[in-house]
Image (spheres, helix red, strand yellow):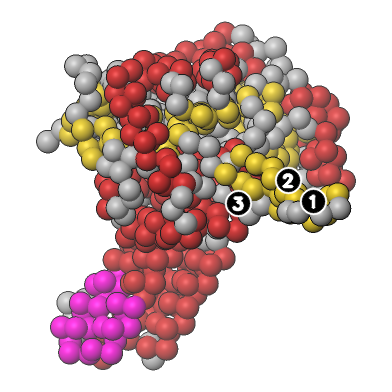
Amino acid sequence: MVKRLKNYINGRFVEASADRYIPVHNPATCQLIGECPDSSRADVDQAVKAAHAAFDEWRSTPVLSRAQYMHRLRNILEERFEDISRVVVEENGKTRDEARGEVRRAIESVDFAISVPSLMRGYKVEDISSGIDETAERQPLGVFAAITPFNFPFMVPLWFLPTAITCGNTYLIKPSPQTPLSMDLFYEIMDEIDLPEGVVNLVHGGAEASQAVMEHPDVVGVSFVGSTPVAKIVYETCGKHGKRVQAQGGAKNYIAVMPDADMAASVANIMGSAFGCAGQRCLAGSVVVAVGDAYEPLKAELLKRASGLRVGYGLEETTQMGTVISDAAKQRIEGMISAGENEGAQVVLDGRGSTIEGFEAGSFVGPTILDGVTSDMSVARDEIFGPVLSIMHAEDFDSAVDMINQSRYGNAASLFTSNGKYAREFKYRIRAGNIGINVGVAAATASFPFGGQKESFFGDLHGQGPDSIEFFTDKKILIERWL
Amino acid sequence: MSSLNTFGAIMTFAIEMETRLRDYYQSAGDAARAADADKRRANLERVRRENVTEIKLEPIEGLDEANYTLDLDVQSDAARATIEATATRFYQDVAPKINVREAQRALERCARQHAEMAP
């Protein structure tokens, strides 16, 4: 039976006021697996009011008690680990291991939130003038919200919510309408841990709900992860409405490979970067720059490995690459491959028109490799967000650095080398927020900020790590003299 | 499933193998070996959950589950020796293919435990 989703407001699941429901399909089987309400501004208002009303009592709940809820949450997430990862596969199309990895990283964010009692401590200096002491205290601010993407439907909301509420704020999540089911399950779990009513809220929907979140006067801050055009809108709208905002946008991540790199080990790792999650990661390697003599062996090894990838339904453990999110995404990605071909790139491995036996209607794009790509081509400049790897050739290290720094995006870049000097130069000179040295997916763990520069990030405090404590608290200054 | 080509495929195969071994030894009245197999099953489930490192997921090559078929229909000392030898070989083959050391260590331990039960 297809589940018609409800919002979660003030401690219970409630029908949205919307009369329109967005169908949710399993992208591999094309089966209808859910109906997501296209919630209205009134639904968002109801959720924010509940969160606002809950704030005063929640912020005065001792921080150690708030952290205890996170212990309970962590335990249930471990118990329900396989259930959650299954739902992520069904709604998103990624492989079972990728979904398990996503849930694991979500749990790591809960682990980080458990440390909030230590992390939100303030500081004090005595006698800033005779008999006068100065203190900085961290205080929660009120209602925060997140607008989250389809590609990591379970992990990304948990980058924010656990830390935000353990800091004493209340929260609202508006997940992607393409992948709302794992958040529905998450709020069932949140209901189980028995938080006070209104501390966490969930509103499903699309553009209207997102707009309402960004404009609501009682929302003090918004975290967003999605495409660059929307990230810009979120940043501008939230700024206009006086909110804190961290908006992570798109990416075009380059991987440079030096001739001295261990080619077999490098390519094994590049495979995971380019084709993991069917290329639908904001940290996916999209362009590999072969430096000097690395070109021929790199191309040969990439072709060999990529053509052997088993593409299929993510719930089958032997599947090494799943689907893209939708048929529309498949059409868009295939269109971008064709555009690259028309601009002069050679399609040396073609994933267009892929069909998988038993899943003929699924949104599959096979691993694709484009060779002879140059900086002026759209496939070198624009985000594809699919399993497409472009090969470029640079004469030397400096040329590779120049190519990479031309990108308008600055999410991630990686270098494969056995030379420490090149590694150091790369880290120093590349204008991207996450750098991998012999690592193709330079993903920050929960206790580090998730970097991002240029058109990949709008804001100043990143998600995760110490930045998240800064984002979710305000430093209030107390200057005291007792006569 | 024929190919053990992912972290999950290997771990799930190992978990299912230990589950079947637990049932096999239970039906043979060997409670100690059944308990050992069940403990390994539980540990492997935990390892599959805790050590799936998203940024290190890589395709795995060269392993086929057909090479590790257990004949669990026969109850005899010889049959048990063959079963334990096959299980040992499975863990010895798969451990080096896993690129997360904690998971590798768990698989190596399973190999040692099965080797102790094989003659």
Residue A150 on the magenta span = no
Residue A313 seen from this side: no
Describe the element under mark 1 as helix, strand or loop: strand
- Looking at the figure, which quarter contains the N terminus of chain A? top left
Residue A37 seen from this side: yes
Describe the element under mark 3 as helix, strand or loop: loop
Q: CA distance from mark 2 to mark 1?
A: 7 Å
Q: Which mark is residue A120?
A: 3
Residue drawn where x is 65% and y is 13% of the image: A377
Residue with the mark numbered 1: A132
Q: Residue A205 in the image: x percent, y percent?
A: 32, 23
Q: Nearer the viewer, residue B47 or A341?
A: B47
Q: Nearer the viewer, residue A279 or A352?
A: A279
Q: CA distance from mark 2 to mark 3?
A: 19 Å
Above or below residue A59? Residue B8 is: below
- Looking at the figure, which quarter contains the C terminus of chain A? bottom right
Residue with the mark numbered 2: A479
Describe the element under mark 2 as helix, strand or loop: strand
The 10 Å Cα crowd at callout 2, few under 14, some 14 to 19, many 20 or more, is few
Residue drawn where x is 86% and y is 49% of the image: A129
- Camera-near label (2 vs 3) is 2
Q: Amino acid at mark 3?
A: Met
Q: Which range is magenta?
A: B17-39
Residue drawn where x is 40% and y is 46% of the image: A57
